[in-house]
Protein backbone atom coordinates (compact mmCIF):
# COMPACT_ATOMS: atom_id res chain seq x y z
CA UNK A 1 0.00 0.00 0.00
CA UNK A 2 1.42 3.38 -0.86
CA UNK A 3 1.14 6.75 0.85
CA UNK A 4 -1.70 7.84 -1.40
CA UNK A 5 -3.69 4.78 -0.36
CA UNK A 6 -3.08 5.49 3.35
CA UNK A 7 -4.24 9.07 2.90
CA UNK A 8 -7.29 7.92 0.94
CA UNK A 9 -8.22 5.47 3.70
CA UNK A 10 -7.87 8.14 6.37
CA UNK A 11 -9.94 10.61 4.38
CA UNK A 12 -12.65 7.99 3.95
CA UNK A 13 -12.52 7.20 7.67
CA UNK A 14 -12.90 10.91 8.41
CA UNK A 15 -15.93 11.14 6.10
CA UNK A 16 -17.52 8.16 7.81
CA UNK A 17 -16.78 9.70 11.22
CA UNK A 18 -18.51 12.92 10.19
CA UNK A 19 -21.49 10.92 8.98
CA UNK A 20 -21.56 9.11 12.33
CA UNK A 21 -21.66 12.42 14.19
CA UNK A 22 -24.54 13.65 12.02
CA UNK A 23 -26.46 10.39 12.51
CA UNK A 24 -25.88 10.58 16.27
CA UNK A 25 -27.20 14.14 16.29
CA UNK A 26 -30.37 12.84 14.65
CA UNK A 27 -30.59 9.90 17.11
CA UNK A 28 -30.13 7.41 14.27
CA UNK A 29 -28.18 4.95 16.43
CA UNK A 30 -28.51 1.98 14.09
CA UNK A 31 -26.97 4.12 11.34
CA UNK A 32 -24.12 5.10 13.70
CA UNK A 33 -23.41 1.42 14.36
CA UNK A 34 -23.52 0.58 10.63
CA UNK A 35 -21.18 3.46 9.78
CA UNK A 36 -18.75 2.44 12.50
CA UNK A 37 -18.73 -1.11 11.16
CA UNK A 38 -17.95 0.28 7.70
CA UNK A 39 -15.26 2.58 9.10
CA UNK A 40 -13.39 -0.01 11.18
CA UNK A 41 -11.72 -1.87 8.27
CA UNK A 42 -10.97 1.42 6.52
CA UNK A 43 -8.98 2.57 9.55
CA UNK A 44 -7.25 -0.79 9.82
CA UNK A 45 -6.26 -0.61 6.15
CA UNK A 46 -4.87 2.90 6.63
CA UNK A 47 -2.24 1.55 9.01
CA UNK A 48 -1.11 -1.52 7.12
CA UNK A 49 1.77 -1.36 4.72
CA UNK A 50 4.89 0.78 4.49
CA UNK A 51 5.95 3.56 6.82
CA UNK A 52 5.04 6.98 5.43
CA UNK A 53 7.20 10.09 5.26
CA UNK A 54 7.26 12.38 8.28
CA UNK A 55 5.02 14.95 6.56
CA UNK A 56 2.56 12.23 5.64
CA UNK A 57 2.66 10.98 9.25
CA UNK A 58 1.92 14.46 10.54
CA UNK A 59 -1.05 14.68 8.20
CA UNK A 60 -2.21 11.25 9.35
CA UNK A 61 -1.87 12.32 12.99
CA UNK A 62 -4.05 15.36 12.33
CA UNK A 63 -6.75 13.28 10.64
CA UNK A 64 -6.65 10.74 13.47
CA UNK A 65 -7.06 13.59 15.99
CA UNK A 66 -10.12 14.79 14.05
CA UNK A 67 -11.56 11.28 14.02
CA UNK A 68 -10.99 10.95 17.77
CA UNK A 69 -12.71 14.29 18.40
CA UNK A 70 -15.68 13.22 16.29
CA UNK A 71 -15.81 9.94 18.22
CA UNK A 72 -15.78 11.89 21.48
CA UNK A 73 -18.74 13.94 20.26
CA UNK A 74 -20.64 10.82 19.20
CA UNK A 75 -19.98 9.24 22.61
CA UNK A 76 -21.20 12.39 24.34
CA UNK A 77 -24.40 12.36 22.28
CA UNK A 78 -24.85 8.65 23.01
CA UNK A 79 -24.48 9.33 26.74
CA UNK A 80 -27.15 12.02 26.59
CA UNK A 81 -29.48 9.71 24.65
CA UNK A 82 -28.88 6.92 27.16
CA UNK A 83 -29.65 9.25 30.07
CA UNK A 84 -32.80 10.49 28.35
CA UNK A 85 -33.98 6.92 27.72
CA UNK A 86 -33.30 6.01 31.36
CA UNK A 87 -35.35 9.02 32.51
CA UNK A 88 -38.23 8.00 30.24
CA UNK A 89 -38.14 4.45 31.57
CA UNK A 90 -38.14 5.71 35.14
CA UNK A 91 -41.15 7.93 34.38
CA UNK A 92 -43.00 4.99 32.81
CA UNK A 93 -42.24 2.86 35.84
CA UNK A 94 -43.55 5.57 38.19
CA UNK A 95 -46.67 5.90 36.05
CA UNK A 96 -47.28 2.16 36.21
CA UNK A 97 -46.96 2.18 39.99
CA UNK A 98 -49.47 5.04 40.23
CA UNK A 99 -51.95 3.23 37.97
CA UNK A 100 -51.54 0.00 39.95
CA UNK A 101 -52.04 1.88 43.23
CA UNK A 102 -55.15 3.56 41.87
CA UNK A 103 -56.55 0.22 40.66
CA UNK A 104 -55.96 -1.41 44.05
CA UNK A 105 -57.77 1.44 45.87
CA UNK A 106 -60.63 1.64 43.33
CA UNK A 107 -61.62 -2.02 43.86
Image: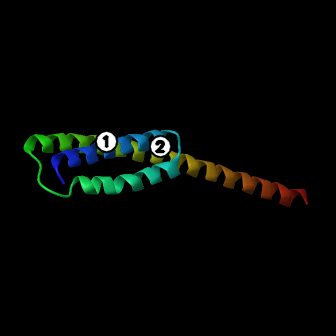
Residue 17, by quadrant, is top left
Residue behind mark 1: 69
Q: Residues within 10 Å of mark 2 (few under 14, many from 20)?
A: many
Q: Position of residue 76 (x, y in %)?
A: 41, 44
Residue at x-position 62% and y-position 53%: 89
Sequence-wise, which precedes: disc 1 or disc 2? 2
> Residue 24 got which mark?
2
Q: Position of residue 50 (x, y in %)?
A: 13, 55
Q: In front here: 35 or 68? A: 35
Rendered-image quadrant of the C terminus: bottom right
Residue at x-position 40% and y-position 47%: 75
Q: Residues within 10 Å of mark 1 (few under 14, many from 20)?
A: few
Number of marks in the rendered image: 2
Rendered-image quadrant of the N terminus: bottom left
Q: Is residue 36 left or right of residue 25?
A: left
> Residue 53 got which mark?
none
Amino acid sequence: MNRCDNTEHLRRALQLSKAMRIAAGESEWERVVALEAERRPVIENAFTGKEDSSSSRRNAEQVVREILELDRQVMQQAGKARDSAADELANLSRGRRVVNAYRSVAR
